[in-house]
Image (cartoon, helix red, strand yellow):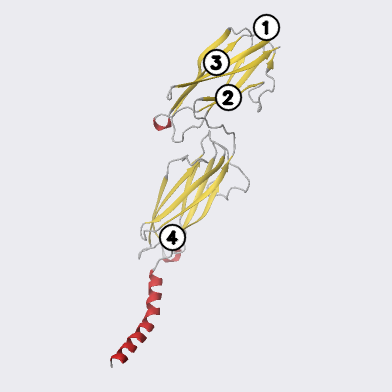
Amino acid sequence: MRAVIAIATVLLAALVSPLDAQTRAAQTPAALKVTHPVVSDSEDGPAFAQGAVFQPGDMLFFSFQVENYRMGLTGKVQLTGHIQAFDPAGTPIVPRDEELIGTTVSEEDKDWKPKLRLQIQLPSIAPPGNYTIRFEALDQQSHQTANGEVGFPVGGKGVEHAQALTIRNLGFYRAAEDAAPLKIAAYRPGDMLWVRFDIAGYRYGDQNSIDAGYDVAVLSPSGKQLFAEENAAVEKSQAYYPQPWVPATFNLSLDGKTTPGTYTLVITAHDAVGNQMAVERMEFKVE
């Protein structure tokens, strides 16, 4: 009699198990997914063209969709999205954005895919390279999270990082709009000479504040100081994104009676936050 009961129990278990498995599968929600990430140069526009490059200061638009979210008995949907963009070194360029979606969806719209968006302003001074957008969605009802990552290129000029205050890319130019510095810095009396350089390696204060500037001096062929201006320009600012370098441009007008010879331009950069100083010299000729 006991053997018959045992066999019956085994048969009953065999009959019930598949049904229980199907029930459990039906009760297990599909995994939350983030899909269709798009980086565009217009709101809800097409994905940025393959091979195209954003430039510092550009505005870009990002969006992604969410699938397999839980819908309550009344059609309630509760989602939280987070989006943040980072430069090539992994430094965030904008604060982490949070967007909430709380709505009720009808049975006819049950296949609706929520879209989360963020408008991102690239820093006006930013290193070139591959930037990254990290994004995630949290379903408040199923307590599932899904995340993703997408990259986009940024072009423009880069300035090499410096561990201490440094003057980089000092050059003379014929005109303000010239792209490349003069290979031979030679001018005539009465000319206007243009100078460009970058200051890097300064320290940051509270809220990424900077206080960097420079002095300008010109020495005669004999080494006598002919001209000097302290604090010719000073950059004092603060921002969420730490400005990686300070670009500098100025011009000097040569007197029409300037004696021909080799003169020396002296740039002295100073960093008030880090209490640093750096000096760079470059010669130019008056013919």
Q: Is residue 49 above or below residue 208?
A: below
Label 4 secondary element: loop
Q: Is residue 20 above or below residue 75?
A: below
Residue 172 vs residue 200: left or right? right
Numbered tag placed on residue 259 in the rendering: 1
Residue 4: percent from left, percent from top: 31, 92
Numbered tag placed on residue 197 in the rendering: 2
Q: Are marks 4 and 1 in contact (CB under 8 Å)?
A: no
Q: Image point 55% across, 18% down: which residue?
A: 267
Give the mark, 4 or 3, whose residue is nearer the N terminus.
4
Is residue 268 among what the camera can see? yes
| Circle 3 residue | 216
Is residue 191 among what the camera can see? no
Numbered tag placed on residue 32 in the rendering: 4
Separation (CA) of disc 4 from disc 2: 51 Å
Separation (CA) of disc 3 from disc 1: 20 Å
Q: Mark 1: few, some, or many residues within 10 Å (few <14, many ≥20)?
A: some
Q: Image point 59% across, 47% down: which residue?
A: 48
Furthest toward the bottom, the residue is 1
Give the mark, 4 or 2, whose residue is nearer the N terminus.
4
